[in-house]
Amino acid sequence: MASRMHASLVAVTYAAVTLPLFAADSSLPVYPNAGSRLHGMPSGSGLSQYETTDSTEKVDAWYGAHLPKACKHENAHGGAKYTCPGTNIMITPDKGMTVITHMASWVGGH
């Protein structure tokens, strides 16, 4: 299961870096108890990733309370996914941490 989770994170990161992207919605909130995970990622890349020791459930609840109502929630990969206009947010467990990925929607859909 952990290797599938890692493979999913690698695939999301690869897709975000290589596919044509719309700009991510920078007005969306970022979980306050999270630090950046992608140091050196170029500005405007359409991807930002954070990590925290807080549980996926706690992070999911925070996003549910702070994201605009236009964002749609679903359970995904032992965590959650929010589909917002222009940006997808994934909350996934990884090696005892919770990883939060803000990824711009690519051309053609979410």
Image: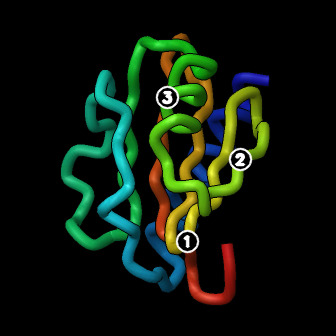
Q: Which residue is mark 3?
A: 62
Q: Amino acid at mark 3?
A: Trp
Q: Quadrant of residue 84?
A: bottom right
Are discs 3 and 1 less than 8 Å apart at CB?
no
**What is the C-alpha distance between the residues marked 3 and 1?**
19 Å
| 97 up-or-down from 34: above or below | above
Whichever of labels 1 and 2 marks the residue nearer the N terminus, that label is 2
The structure's colour scheme is: rainbow
Q: Position of residue 55 (x, y in %)?
A: 55, 14
Q: Position of residue 104 (x, y in %)?
A: 48, 69
Between residue 29 and residue 54, name the one nearer to us: 29
Q: Quadrant of residue 31?
A: top left
Q: Which residue is mark 1?
A: 85
Horizontal relation, residue 97 to residue 56: left or right: left
Whichever of labels 3 and 1 marks the residue nearer the N terminus, that label is 3
Secondary structure beneath dot 3 equals helix
| 24 up-or-down from 106: above or below | above
User: Residue drawn at (26%, 57%), measured in percent from left and top?
Assistant: 41
Which quarter of the rendering shows the C terminus?
A: bottom right
Are discs 1 and 2 less than 8 Å apart at CB?
no
Which quarter of the rendering shows the N terminus?
A: top right
User: Residue drawn at (45%, 82%), measured in percent from left and top?
Assistant: 22
Q: Position of residue 33 (x, y in %)?
A: 31, 22
Horizontal relation, residue 79 to residue 23: left or right: right
User: Any mark on residue 73, and which?
Assistant: 2
Between residue 24 and residue 97, name the one nearer to us: 24
Q: Position of residue 34 (x, y in %)?
A: 32, 27
User: Residue drawn at (38%, 55%), measured in percent from left and top?
Assistant: 28
Between residue 92 and residue 89, name the one nearer to us: 89
Q: Amino acid at mark 1?
A: Pro
**What is the C-alpha distance between the residues marked 3 and 2?**
12 Å
Whichever of labels 3 and 2 marks the residue nearer the N terminus, that label is 3
